[in-house]
Structures are given as C-alpha cells and as structure tokens.
Image (cartoon, grey):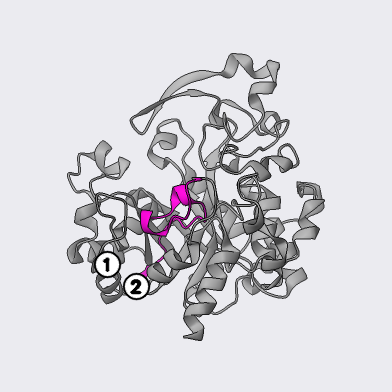
C-alpha cells in the first residue's frame, strides 16, 4: 500500500474523528430521512449567523473526505464531518428525468461500476462537453432509478489503493438525500452542517433542457437553505450560473476560477473575451462582488509555481479580493506527492505523502479564508498550527 502510515486513524482521532462509525455505514436512502418541512416550518432552518461566523481558515471537505473514501458518497461526506471539516462539498449533475445527483462529473465511467452492468452497455457513447470529447457513460442518459442500481467506486485507484476497500459500499446520492442527511447529522451533532454546492457544466445542461439552477433553487427553498445566512455556499466555474442563482435565492455564492489563461465556458459560448486573468484583476473582482460573496481560485492563482513546479511568491489576489469584500476558498489541497508543489514532495513515490503540512502552512499564511482539501484532518491540524502561532 502506498499511503501506509499517513492514513493512521490515531492521527484523525486528535480531531474527534469517529471513523469506525463510517466503516459499516450504509447509504442513507430517501426513506431513512424525514420528509421536507411543511410550509411555515422552514423559517427556523438555517437560522445561524451566516458564513462570516465560520472558523477562518474554513476547511472544506473536497467531495467529502475523498482522500480516504470514494468521492461523493455519504460515507465520504460523513467521514468529512467526523474528521471535523467545517463544510462538505457536493458537485451536482442531472439525470435524464431531471433529478440532481452528486458526482464530480456527468461522466460516471471512472466513479461507478457502470461498466460491469451489461444492461447499460448500449448507453456508452461519445460526447463533447465544454469543448472536451469524452467516451463513456453519462448521468443525463440514465433515469434516477437506473442510476440507483450502480455503486460508487474510487476514481484514482492507482494513487488511493486503500480507498478501493470501499468500492461498491455506497450508491450515488441525490442532492435531496444529502439535504436530508445534513439535517439529520445537524440534529445528531447539535450544529449546522454546512454544504458547498457546485453546478457542473450549467451551460451544457441548459442546452439539453436540464437547467441546474432552477432545480437547485427549488430544493434549497424546500429545505430552508435559500437565505443569506443559510448554511450553504453555491459555487460554479460559470459566472452566469452564479448570476442566475443570485436571482433565485439569497444563499452565499462563490465564483470558481481555473487557470489564469482559461476562459469560463459560458464566456466562450457568449463570445466574452475575458480570461480568468482578467477576472482576478481589481476590476474583475469588483464585477464578481456585484453578485457573489466569494471566489474559489485554484491555489496557483494565490501562489504560482515556477518552471520546476516549486512555489514562487504570492500574488496580490488575497489582498485584492478582500478589498472587494470577497472571501477566498482556494482549491485543492491533497497529501500525496503527485499533488504537492515540487518543494514539498518527499521521496520518489508519487503516491506517498509529502510535506503536506509545510505546503498548507505556506498557503494559509497568505490570508486565504478557507481551503478545499481531500484530507480535511490534515488541513484542520495545519489551521490549528496557524492559530497557535
């Protein structure tokens, strides 16, 4: 096993982890959670103090605790909470019959056992999504009932061999099931369970008649997470999706930002020439601040790497975003050497853990407000180190 001792549960226990509870946990089906609130009851839900009251830096469990469990499963989400993460992330894609499910991509070839289901062999196809041609199986070609016959599995088994132990344990959750699960966990733990929810490929899906924003807004309203102080962030790489959501709900919103040279896909489709490099300038950030409360930049926009892959000097992004009143939730911290800056890798095994704490110390010292992490326990310990100093 390449990860070995770094996944030692004793280290997680420092943060009050209850990982053993996750090992045998089955997926929470719709029948296991209480019904949606009746009209008039939802006013009491999400009555916390809002996102400004979250700990800083906020640790967001990226697709759940995906460094330890197959991503976007209730097992991964639950472990994220057990490890102490402040917020749990979901990515949303639709089914053929319009349900929102939690998958990082609509291409489910690598994250489910769909290839083992001969009854779905005819659904394998080639599509172009946001300019990228892919061959596989896609959620928009399945009904929810069909998707529920599949089981989730580890996306990168070569790197996270230990995670394959949990292949087949959980099904694909709907977002409504996650909302019910979050309410149940909130009552059990005595605190709000914060979610960080991304609309994936919204322009593409709108073109198929499967618009994400309206479906998402209906669920947020049904479960009382549509207010400015509600325990949920809404995020997207397409600014127009966030603008659309801003007209539907008051939940806090975050614009995700990829590589500086890239253009959001909705910009490409609309003929907007601006790149991410334009959006991180003061005028671009002011434009984002007119409809969003934060940004989620790639970590390279906070501290770029040099030609050798080592960290360089921080940019002015943190200062400039804060000047516009925006919070920053950069992505993504992972413990493995292959994902770390070159100066924090240790040894020659790309799958082994490197100096994750050293990298986190450098990133957190820039003043970012939070960070997405596949290993939330590591990020929490780094945040505690920062607070201790």
Q: CA distance from mark 1 to mark 2?
A: 7 Å
Q: Residues within 10 Å of mark 1 (few under 14, many from 20)?
A: some
Q: Say if residue 165 shows up in the picture.
A: yes
Q: Which residues are magenta?
A: 327-349
Q: Is residue 332 magenta?
A: yes
The residue singled out by tag 2 in the image is: 366
Q: Residues within 10 Å of mark 2 (few under 14, many from 20)?
A: some
How many dots with numbers? Answer: 2
Where residue 160 appears, x then y in whole percent? 60, 44
Q: Is residue 97 magenta?
A: no
Where residue 1 appears, x then y in whole percent? 65, 44
The residue singled out by tag 1 in the image is: 314
User: In this rendering, is residue 243 above or below 125?
Assistant: below
Left or right: 144 as drawn, with respect to 207: right
Residue 376, quarter of the rendered image: bottom right
Q: Residue at x 43, y 71 (%)?
A: 361
Where residue 131 appears, x then y in whole percent? 33, 30
Q: Nearer the viewer, residue 339 or 209?
A: 339
Task: Kindly indicate whether the residue at mark 2 contacts the one at mark 1 (C-beta within 8 angstroms).
Answer: yes
User: In this rendering, is residue 270 above or below 339?
Assistant: above
Where residue 19 appears, x then y in whole percent? 74, 60
User: In this rendering, is residue 287 above or below 216?
Assistant: below
């Amino acid at each position: 096993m390449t990860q070995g001792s770094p996944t030692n549960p004793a280290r997680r226990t420092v943060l009050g982890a209850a990982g053993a509870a996750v090992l045998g946990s089955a997926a929470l089906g719709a029948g296991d959670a209480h019904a949606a609130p009746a009209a008039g009851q939802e006013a009491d839900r999400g009555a916390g103090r809002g996102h400004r009251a979250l700990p800083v830096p906020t640790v967001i469990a990226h697709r759940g605790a995906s460094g330890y469990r197959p991503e976007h499963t209730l097992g991964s989400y639950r472990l994220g909470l057990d490890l102490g993460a402040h917020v749990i992330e979901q990515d949303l894609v639709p089914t053929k019959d319009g349900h929102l499910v939690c998958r990082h991509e609509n291409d489910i070839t690598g994250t489910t056992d769909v290839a083992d289901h001969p009854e779905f062999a005819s659904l394998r196809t080639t599509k172009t999504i946001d300019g990228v041609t892919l061959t596989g199986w896609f959620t928009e070609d399945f009904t929810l009932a069909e998707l529920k016959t599949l089981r989730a599995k580890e996306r990168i088994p070569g790197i996270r061999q230990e995670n394959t132990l949990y292949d087949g344990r959980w099904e694909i959750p709907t977002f409504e099931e996650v909302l019910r699960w979050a309410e149940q966990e909130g009552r059990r733990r005595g605190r709000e369970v914060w979610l960080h929810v991304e609309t994936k490929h919204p322009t593409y899906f709108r073109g198929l008649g499967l618009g994400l924003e309206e479906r998402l807004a209906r669920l947020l309203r049904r479960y009382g997470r549509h207010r400015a102080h509600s325990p949920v962030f809404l995020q997207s790489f397409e600014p127009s999706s966030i603008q659309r959501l801003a007209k539907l709900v008051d939940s806090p919103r975050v614009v995700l930002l990829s590589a500086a040279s890239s253009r959001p896909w909705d910009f490409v489709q609309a003929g907007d020439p601006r790149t991410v490099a334009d959006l991180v300038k003061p005028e671009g950030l002011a434009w984002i601040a007119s409809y969003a409360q934060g940004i989620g930049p790639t970590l390279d926009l906070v501290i770029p790497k040099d030609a050798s892959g080592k960290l360089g000097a921080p940019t002015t992004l943190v200062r400039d975003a804060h000047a516009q009143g925006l919070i920053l939730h950069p992505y993504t911290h992972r413990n493995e050497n292959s994902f770390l800056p070159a100066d924090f890798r240790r040894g020659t095994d790309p799958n082994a853990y490197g100096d994750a704490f050293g990298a986190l110390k450098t990133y957190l010292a820039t003043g970012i407000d939070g960070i997405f992490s596949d290993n939330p326990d590591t990020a929490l310990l780094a945040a505690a180190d920062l607070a201790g100093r």
